[in-house]
Image (spheres, rainbow, N blue to C red):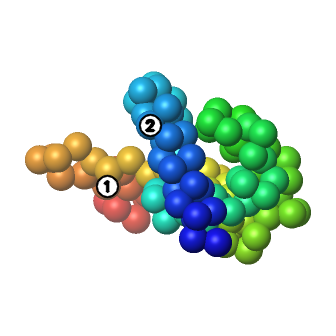
Amino acid sequence: MRAQRVVLSLVVMMAGIAAAGSALSQEYRGTYEQQMACTPDVWRLCFDQIPDANRITACLRQKTPQLSDPCRAVFESNASAQQQPQVQAPPRGRAVQPPPRPRTDDDQ
């Protein structure tokens, strides 16, 4: 069992090194914790897609009903984060002015 863990760690590390060269030009892959939550599911469901991270992600999305609870939570949290509108912060150093209030007959 310990030997399997060592081999698994080495393969994951090698896949990470292979993906590191293109990591800057590709989409965000998740935090270390998110990757670790899905690693067992990658081996169980999508091992034939290793080391291609895009194919692994697509495979996991296709097999969402079969994912473990921690990995499913990663995909659900990412999906809900993408659906929320992004609010831009005002530029630094400038106060945000409220929009002008419409004038009414009572203002005179």
Specify the quadrant of the image occupied by residue 21. top left
Label annotation for residue 98: 1
Residue drawn at point x = 31 percent, y = 55 percent: 98
Q: Nearer the viewer, residue 13 or 37?
A: 13
Whether the residues at callouts 2 and 1 have beta carbons within 8 Å, the answer is no
Q: Position of residue 16 (x, y in %)?
A: 49, 42
Residue drawn at point x = 58 percent, y = 64 percent: 3
Q: Position of residue 64 (x, y in %)?
A: 82, 58
Q: Is residue 77 visible?
A: no
Nearer the camera: disc 2 or disc 1: 2
Q: How many marks?
A: 2
Residue drawn at point x = 46 percent, y = 57 percent: 31
Describe residue 10's horizontal placement relative to residue 58 as left or right: left
Q: Name the amino acid, label 2.
A: Ile
Q: Name the amino acid, label 1.
A: Pro
| Disc 2 to disc 1, C-alpha distance | 50 Å
Q: Position of residue 101 (x, y in %)?
A: 38, 55
Specify the quadrant of the image occupied by residue 8. bottom right
Question: How packed is label 2: few (under 14 Cα within 10 Å), some, or many (20 or more)?
Answer: few
Residue 46 position (above or below residue 64): above
Residue denoted by label 2: 17
